[in-house]
Image (spheres, helix red, strand yellow):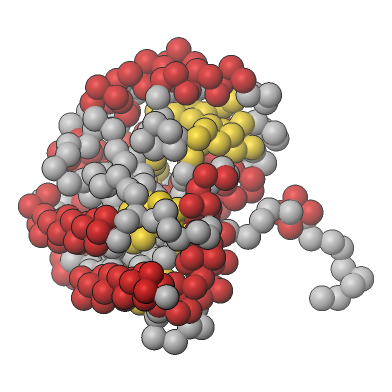
Amino acid sequence: MNQSLPKLNPAITAIPADKILSFQASIQGVDDLVFLTFGEPGFDTPKEVKEATVKGIQENHSHYGNSQGNPELRQAVLDYMEDRYDLRGFAIDQVVMTAGVTEAIYAVFKVLLSAGDGILVPDPAFGSYFSSIALAGGQAISVDTSKSGFKLTPAMVKEAIESADVPVKAVLFNYPSNPTGVTYDEAELKALAEAFKEAGVWVISDEIYSELTYGRVHRSIASYLPDQAIVVNGLSKSHAMTGYRVGFVLAPTAVAKQIQKVHGNLVYSIPTFVYDGALAALRMPKAALQPMIDTYQERRDMAVAVLKELGFDLLSPDGAFYIFAKLPKDIEEDGWTFAEKLAKEGKVGVIPGEAFSQFDGAKDYVRLSYAGETAQLEEGLKRLKAYIEKRRAN
Ligand code: PLP
């Protein structure tokens, strides 16, 4: 770099690299690796979505669009949320279409946080929350959920807010959860909603895995907190559309206005032909996605059975496509070392638990993804079993 140029912003330079990405990069060069690392659906994007997107391109939907998302699309978001989760009472000016949930979350942080403000994060959590909060100038306050089945409880909310030494603006809530797959039932959500109300903090609810629940009904926390919840969701996982970059936010009107201000300046709008694909996706009936959801459930059952048989300690996930598993007792090393050796010697990629956590306990865990293709999962599990059995035999 040219030494005479001004220094880069030190606040950004100081943000540590994403641990998930750096671990993935460290094993990328291993030959013949089966990746059980990514949250990348092993399905093609539905045909109707692809066709609508191509048609949009052919019809020259290639100009600047409505920055917030065209009204028809925002109405489709509301219809979708009502159809799937019985969420009612929102208007289209409360919806902002974003470049994935990633942008939505950052925009929400920018709207809520002044320098140094705190956000409660039930931990373990999606790793990029921590860097995104730091990028927006805030401070993540991790709440350890490892002793409550990886669930946040009303008592934990109260305790964390009372003991925080910075102003707490919001709770960042994600269910079904990455990395644990844990989700909440109606009674738990109602109790948490009461606690959030009492605490008087915003609730940012990342519900990106809401379609992917197994034998469970998903309810949005916004049903109980319409004036306090900021819901983020998107099509990446549910519709195998990670590369399309479609997310959306539902928020109280005054908040949505501010989010739109940030979004308008960050990306202006997602590609206008992608609006066409997103509209087709949102209009797909639940039944059309069911075979994909059933396949994830079968994969979950297969992976849980093998991991349990090998002595991993885990909760069978109720949603998303991850398993957060504690290493068997006889593996006396941390998750990072285990994951590195497993990649290099056993040829299977998993992510060390500490990439999702600011607590020491996560060092004993790894996260395995069953999002990819079934054959790949079968091969990965076969190799994992062979690797552990070989270690035990020596
Ligand atoms: N939120 C959670 C909890 C995730 O696990 C992920 C991706 O893994 C994202 C958000 C990113 O979603 P998007 O592709 O919509 O940016």
Q: Position of residue 42 (x, y in %)?
A: 26, 69
In percent of the image, x 59 and y 34: which residue is there?
Answer: 141
- Quarter in which the N terminus is drawn: bottom right
Name, please, the residue furthest toward the right.
4
- Quarter in which the C terminus is drawn: bottom left
In the picture provided, is 67 more to the left or to the right than 292? Answer: right
Name, please, the residue furthest toward the front.
394
Instruction: Say if residue 197 shows up in the picture.
Output: yes
From the viewer's side, name the closer residue of 187 and 201: 187
Against 231, residue 379 (above or below) is below
Q: Position of residue 63 (x, y in %)?
A: 40, 65
Name, please, the residue furthest toward the left.
287
Labels in figure, total: 0
In percent of the image, x 17 and y 46: which residue is there?
Answer: 214
Against 287, residue 306 (above or below) is below
Name, please, the residue furthest toward the bottom.
31
Q: Position of residue 48 (x, y in %)?
A: 15, 65
Instruction: Say if residue 236 shows up in the picture.
Output: no
Q: Position of residue 58 (x, y in %)?
A: 26, 75
Against 356, residue 202 (above or below) is above
In percent of the image, x 17 and y 39: which residue is there?
Answer: 216
In percent of the image, x 44 and y 18: which residue is there?
Answer: 155
In the picture provided, is 274 more to the left or to the right than 166? Answer: left
Among the 4 quarters of the image, the one containing residue 373:
bottom left
